Amino acid sequence: MLSLTPRSDQGAALLPAWHPDFRRADKLPDTKVVRTRFFINFASLAVAASLLLYFAYREYTMSKYDEQIADWQAKIDANRKASDQALALSRKFGDEERKLAEFESFLKPQLVLSRFLVHLGETLPPELTIDRVTVEEGGVSLRGIALGKVEEASGRISPYVEQLRADRALAEFFGPATQGRVERDQASGQLIFDLFLPFKGAARK
């Protein structure tokens, strides 16, 4: 028969509680270990994924560079023949130009210094004197003296420059004459001037 005697307190204590007893820490589940292990695994996966993406991007970039280099090399190879032909024509043109320049130089009249000085003396105005003639790489420099008072002497230089420019005999060898220094000599009181006759096709250095 069923016993109607109530269970003792000792038997009730042996039954498991319906919720954890938070007062007994040793009986609680260790949730901290679970969380730490989860974050460690997540961080490891993130690092591995980042490294994988980095190396994949690097390989992709290198492949693009290789494609560009191959494309450029193909263009260079395709244009090499035309470039070589252009260089050959340029060298040939340079040789022909040099030969033509030598031929033109041979045909040009040569300046004879003695004739030049005689012509210079014959066409020089009486109020002017030339006391120095210097042949330079780019032309001929003239140093002269304008006689008379300073005001009158300075007005005689410009007309002489125009005379040299209009001289047909000189135009065969020289370009337009240019006026340089004009100053008064302190010792003699005379007006000193410099002129320059440039050779045709040459620049003064």
Image: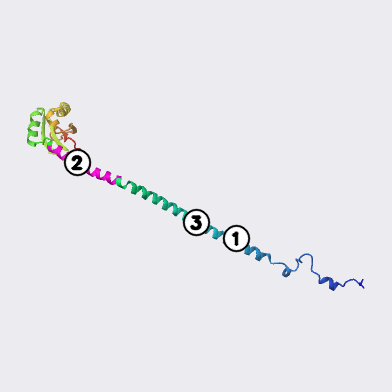
Along the polypeptide, which appears first: circle 2 or circle 1?
1
For label 3, the SS is helix
Query: Which secondary structure is most common in the magenta stretch?
Result: helix
Report the magenta residues as a range.
82-106
Left or right: 119 as drawn, with respect to 5? left
Foreground of the two, 94 or 28: 94
Residue 103 belongs to magenta span: yes
The crowding category of the residue bearing disc 3, from other C-alpha atoms within 10 Å (few below 14, some 14 to 19, many at least 20), is few
Residue type at numbered disc 3: Ala
CB under 8 Å between discs 3 and 1: no
| x, y percent for residue 110 | 10, 36
Residue type at numbered disc 2: Glu
Residue labelled with disc 2? 96
Residue labelled with disc 1? 42
- Label 3 vs label 2: CA separation? 58 Å
Rendering quarter of residue 35: bottom right
Along the polypeptide, which appears first: circle 3 or circle 2?
3
